[in-house]
Image (cartoon, rainbow, N blue to C red):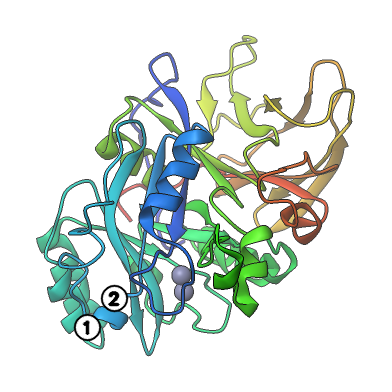
């Protein structure tokens, strides 16, 4: 079996130290020429008002010939006292789109100039610059045509329009089944704001009423409220995605030894004993009071089962015995009623029934592969 099964694994990091933080990994402001009425001041003020913890404003680098440091990052509006702002851009290349993300400024021009290089040369450059490489909308027009071996994370939910993401989910499942652990995230890819002056309304303004900061929202379980901790948690898959910030956050846990304590969460990886493992799906915060939600469990790319959350506890458990002789992963999809997002009123209909997606819990994955 390639990759081989691990003989030992470090103990899971646990979740005694950490906090849930919410944000959006993919947005365009006025420095992308296909945006409208969307200065950074508007995006950031909205995120501050809504209590978001972090944002990545990722303009198309090709619109400024790679000079994002002299445009998006140099804009005096690129600042916030409460929202952590990542340095980054959307690498916009003939082979597709990549969000380059970093806690600190880096030399984006070098990445842009190398956008058509061979992937093995891009890997060297990526390691040189110490950046996070996140595969964007793997299946859409401008699909991700680079190697997934470059990717630290993947965008499985792009914009509020859920149905067009279904093939991207399959692409992610294919990578997971091959032995790759790739953290998943969302990204609104929002381009358009609503102008205060009606004279500035353009045909695409309507998009801003259905897709904006937080459609979808990515929840990150970080060990600290810092940009490096958030990026690390994203890479580990300690994250889940909700269609909007008023919907519940899905959390997936596992008890591997039957002691009633859940010691694994999304993104964690353990060697199974062969005995039963109890999984718990929890919905936290937000949502519709009294509602039940449908939980679809995916094991190794196939549907494992469908369960319904208890309306009082907002959780559900299931049991399975992952094989000690093979790799397995389990992830969940939550369908149900959309919580209203009055600030982005047309987004709920576009997300249809999809409320939230988890990252997987892994068994027998080789972290050194
Ligand atoms: Zn794109
Ligand atoms: Zn984009």
Is residue 11 placed above or below 186 in the rendered structure?
above
Question: Which of 153/164 is in front?
Answer: 164
Q: Name the residue under label 2.
A: 61
- Residue 277 seen: no
Residue drawn at (45%, 47%), measured in percent from left and top? 365
Any mark on residue 153, and which?
none
- Residue 25 seen: yes
**Marks 1 & 2, CB-CB < 8 Å contact:** yes
Q: Where is residue 113 in the image (x, y as percent from the top left)?
A: 16, 83
Label 2: state its secondary structure: helix
Question: Which of 245/266 is in front?
Answer: 245
Corner quadrant of residue 272: top right
Residue drawn at (71%, 28%), measured in percent from left and top? 286
**Disc 1 to disc 2, C-alpha distance:** 6 Å
Q: Mark 1 points at which residue?
A: 65
Label 1: state its secondary structure: loop
Is residue 251 placed above or below 208 in the rendered structure?
above
Question: Which of 344/300 is in front?
Answer: 344
């Amino acid at each position: 079996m390639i990759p081989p099964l691990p003989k030992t694994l470090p103990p899971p990091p646990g979740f005694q130290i950490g906090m849930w933080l919410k944000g959006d990994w993919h947005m365009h402001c006025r420095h992308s020429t296909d945006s409208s009425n969307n200065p950074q001041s508007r995006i950031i003020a909205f995120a501050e008002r809504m209590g978001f913890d972090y944002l990545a404003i990722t303009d198309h680098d090709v619109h400024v010939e790679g000079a994002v440091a002299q445009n998006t990052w140099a804009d005096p509006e690129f600042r916030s006292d409460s929202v952590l702002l990542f340095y980054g851009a959307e690498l916009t290349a003939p082979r597709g789109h990549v969000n380059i993300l970093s806690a600190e400024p880096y030399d984006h021009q070098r990445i842009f100039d190398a956008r058509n290089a061979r992937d093995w040369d891009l890997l060297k450059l990526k390691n040189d610059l110490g950046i996070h490489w996140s595969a964007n909308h793997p299946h859409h027009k401008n699909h991700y045509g680079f190697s997934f071996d470059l990717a630290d994370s993947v965008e499985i939910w792009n914009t509020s329009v859920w149905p067009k993401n279904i093939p991207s989910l399959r692409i992610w499942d294919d990578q997971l089944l091959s032995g790759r652990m790739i953290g998943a995230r969302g990204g609104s890819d929002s381009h358009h704001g609503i102008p205060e002056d009606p004279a500035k309304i353009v045909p695409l303004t309507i998009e801003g009423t259905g897709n904006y900061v937080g459609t979808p929202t990515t929840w990150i379980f970080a060990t600290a409220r810092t940009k490096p901790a958030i990026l690390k948690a994203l890479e580990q898959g300690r994250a889940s995605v909700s269609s909007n910030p008023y919907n519940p956050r899905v959390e997936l846990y596992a008890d591997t030894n039957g002691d009633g304590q859940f010691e694994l969460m999304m993104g964690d990886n353990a060697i199974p004993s062969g005995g039963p493992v109890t999984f718990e799906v929890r919905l936290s915060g937000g949502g519709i009071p009294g509602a039940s939600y449908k939980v679809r469990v995916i094991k190794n790319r196939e549907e494992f089962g469908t369960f319904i959350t208890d309306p009082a506890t907002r959780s559900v458990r299931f049991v399975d015995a992952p094989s000690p002789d093979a790799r397995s992963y389990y992830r969940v999809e939550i369908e149900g009623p959309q919580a209203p997002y009055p600030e982005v009123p047309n987004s709920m209909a576009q997300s249809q029934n999809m409320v939230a997606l988890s990252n997987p819990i892994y068994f027998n994955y080789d972290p050194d592969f």
